[in-house]
Image (tube, helix red, strand yellow):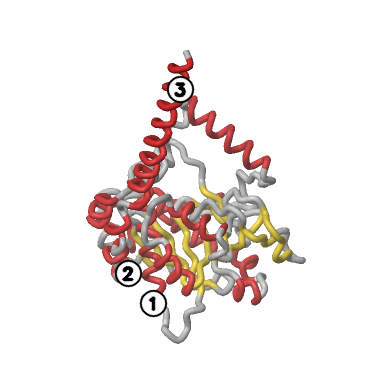
Amino acid sequence: MIFNGRCGKKRHRSIVFILFPTIFLVTNVLFNVPNNSLLNQTQLIKPFDQSLLFPINGSIKYLGKACPIYIINLPSRSDRRTESVALIQTLDLQAFIVPAYSIHSPEIYILNQNRNKLFLKLTELACWASHMRMWISIVNNTSSQNNNTWSIIFEDDIDLEIDTPYIMQSLPYSIWNDADLIYLGHCANPPGKLIYQSSKYIYRLYQALHPSCTHAYAIRSNTAEKLINLLSKPSRPIDDLIIKLVDNQQLIAYSIHPPLAIQKLVSKTNPSDVNQINRQSLMYHIQLTIYTFIQWWNGVQPCKALNKSTLKKANLTKAIYWRKMYEKGIWKNYT
């Protein structure tokens, strides 16, 4: 019995000695093997050719101190493009629709060869590349003498508060000097330190603690340059990578509460190109319950609708007609 016990202990020790090096090696492979091949990933992503931009003319060029305004849209998603055009026209903004990468884009096909398939979906890789191309274009268009300019980046599935231009304009000058990123929605992140409270509007600006989204944000040009360097290895979804930088205090991020921008709910008529999930499944409802509980526990204020929705006042018929009149090139080919 004693002999068997000693043999058992020796076996356990042997297993431990084998197991830990194995875990170390596997972890090292998962996280580090792609590094050598990913060093030049951003070299595949080029700034936008101006001919690819689809301009929407309006009298308001700035949201606060941020200009220009970009909307990322897949050329194949004409449904979302119609809503984006209607949204911008209703607010009388000047903006540019820019093409997103799809999972079928040649650049994504090449990048996919080094993708960490355990932690990054192919659609998430395309999302990373689309925002990366925005940042590269912003830096490319910024004068070397002024790297402190701001731009707005929207995704094509959002709704905006009707007073967004006036609320953004009311933010103090100091806010734009201090922040790297300003999220127009709170991205389901709990409010951190109160940075600014408007006396005219109900909106408040907080330190962003866990900004898990990229659907609507203002970004400083030198921040874009910083992100190009820091996030050149897409090992996780892009919002998770930004969260890590915020947590490590490498970025200063603010978020607006209640949100000025929300994403439309995914449905059969509004499918997602990134998160293709079965919302009727039991697993989805379990995950949603856990996610909702975590939000409540962290003090996140849920927001399913805006105070004054712009899309509710938008003229989709006018937007469709306008698109037919002015779309050309890659945009018209998908009509």
Q: Nearer the viewer, residue 39 or 221?
A: 39
Give above or below for 148 relative to 90. Answer: below
Q: Residue at x 43, y 61 (%)?
A: 71
Front of the two marks 2 and 3: 3
Alpha carbon of mark 2 to alpha carbon of mark 1: how far?
A: 9 Å
Check disc 1: other Cα within 10 Å, few if <14, some if 14-19, many if 20+.
few
Instruction: Tell me, yes or no, if residue 53 can be seen here.
Output: yes
- Going by the picture, which residue comes out furthest to the front? 3
Label 2 close to label 1 by CB (< 8 Å): yes
Q: Which residue is mark 2?
A: 47
Check disc 2: other Cα within 10 Å, few if <14, some if 14-19, many if 20+.
some
In the structure shown, which secondary structural element does the residue marked by tag 2 occupy? Answer: loop
Query: Which numbered dot is residue 141?
Result: 1
Q: Nearer the viewer, residue 61 or 28?
A: 28
Query: Which numbered dot is residue 18?
Result: none
Q: Which residue is mark 3?
A: 6
Instruction: Tell me, yes or no, if residue 313 can be seen here.
Output: no
Left or right of residue 236: residue 208: right
Picture quadrant of residue 180: bottom right
Front of the two marks 3 and 1: 3
Check disc 3: other Cα within 10 Å, few if <14, some if 14-19, many if 20+.
few
User: Which mark sits nearer the N-terminus, 3 or 1?
Assistant: 3
User: Which mark sits nearer the N-terminus, 2 or 1?
Assistant: 2
In the structure shown, which secondary structural element does the residue marked by tag 1 occupy? Answer: helix
Q: Nearer the viewer, residue 252 or 7?
A: 7
